[in-house]
Amino acid sequence: MKVVKFGGSSMADAGQYRKIRDILLADPERRVVVVSAAGKRNKADHKITDLLYLCYAHTQYGVDCSGVFEMIVSRYREIQRDLGLTLDLEPEFAALKQRLDAKAVTQDELASRGEYFSARLMAAYLGFQFVDAADWVKFKFDGTVDQESSYEALRGLVRGMGVVIPGFYGLMPDGRIRTFTRGGSDITGALAAAALDADVYENWTDVSGILMADPRIVENPKTIPEVTYDELRELSYSGAQVLHEGTIFPVREKNIPLNIRNTNAPEDPGTMIQEKFQLDSDPQRFITGITGKKDFTIIAVSKRGMSSQVGVLRKILTVLERHDISVDYVPNGIDNVSVVMPTESVASSLYAILGEIQKEVEPDRLDVHDQIAVVAAVGRKMAFRPGISGQIFAALGQAGINIRMINQGPDELNIIFGVDNRDFASAIRVLYNSFIKE
Ligand code: ASP
């Protein structure tokens, strides 16, 4: 059995609902459907969830939100009419509006209604059982999900045939609705897959998987066919926007493969995410993906004899800890060490930090470099394979790109290096053209 989750753009109008039905008909294993609220139909359109938050904000300031509310319900009316459904949501729309006017609805409850109405319509359209997320996604008071009792509750609700579940929300122990953070329908899908021991969790969106590089930098980048969870973590840490953070752990815990697919191109295989791959579908390519971020600051500390002194690094890190700054990389030489972190995180306390390092470490030199970009080449196949970093740095050298810092973890899952911000895009292009593009 497969759990299939459809994101906002896949739920935007009746045409998308039809595509979803075809996707389900193409594979009878696709029996548990998790849906988002209706998303944008075009660039200028609005996401229903955004409108719901906007509507709530109106009521908070005592402004009438009837206009926005009408935009929301008319979208669902349109889908219902275009699909020719007899399901009548009017009484529910009216009841919600009444409670909204009476200020009897919380922000989370209102925000959750986008998914709720989507799921009601989709269940009616497919002739599937509607299973409300409020009946099984159970939050604890600390805001985390009580996985075991949620899983058990869902297993008790599913009657074997196809089901449709709204994403994004669940119930607090006091009976109130609570939402996940934005984009959280992914988590509901992962929880459903874990609860029902799905063979695969398919996450359907509007792209054909995770790209090997940012399409704003590389023209038409290839899709990553297979990626491990560890690689995915590296890719998203270093900049690639992939999945909602909490999505991964429920399926990873149960070793359920996660497949990212495109509702608008269902024949594309998408990206398969798994703990390990037994067979290598592409043995030649050793880089899985290239990513990175701009705007890092390097604080470089030099002190004669540092290598034989005890506690210098601790003193530097203690200063940063005092300012609540998390350090991303610590490249070092014999008598020098640098700390690298996002410029934004140190901007307001930089001089205080430098003053404290000066006083506590008494360095010979203390330098700050900013406008630094970090680029990460990620790939499980780079590990324990000699010559890879040599090839990467040779390609960058030939392109005249100066490398300001190098970092590789002992797991050899990535090679990370720093360049000037202005070399960021060309460094990514050089790597892509040398090692990914055929
Ligand atoms: N509708 C919610 C949002 O826009 C959740 C989701 O689509 O995953 O954030």
Image: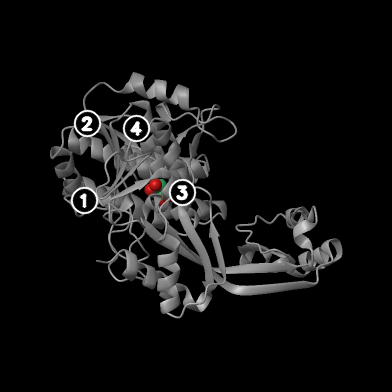
Q: CA distance from mark 1 to mark 2?
A: 17 Å
CB atoms at circles 4 and 2 under 8 Å apart?
A: no
Residue matched to label 1? 16
* Residue 65 appears in view: no
Residue 288 in picture, x, y percent from top left? 36, 55
Q: Is residue 198 above or below residue 274?
A: above
Q: Earlier in the sequence, mark 4 or mark 1?
A: 1
Which of pointers 1 and 3 indicates the residue nearer the eye? 3
Residue 95 in picture, x, y percent from top left? 39, 38
Residue 144 in picture, x, y percent from top left? 54, 34
Residue kind at label 3, given as amino acid type: Arg
Residue matched to label 4? 193
Residue 243 in picture, x, y percent from top left? 41, 49
Q: CA distance from mark 3 to mark 4?
A: 20 Å
Which of pointers 4 and 1 indicates the residue nearer the eye? 4
Residue kind at label 1, given as amino acid type: Gln
Q: Which mark is residue 128?
A: 2
Q: Is residue 373 above or below residue 72?
A: below
Q: State the residue lying farthest toward the bottom.
A: 400
Dividing the image into 4 quarters, which one contains the C terminus? bottom left
Dividing the image into 4 quarters, which one contains the N terminus? top left
* Residue 130 appears in view: yes
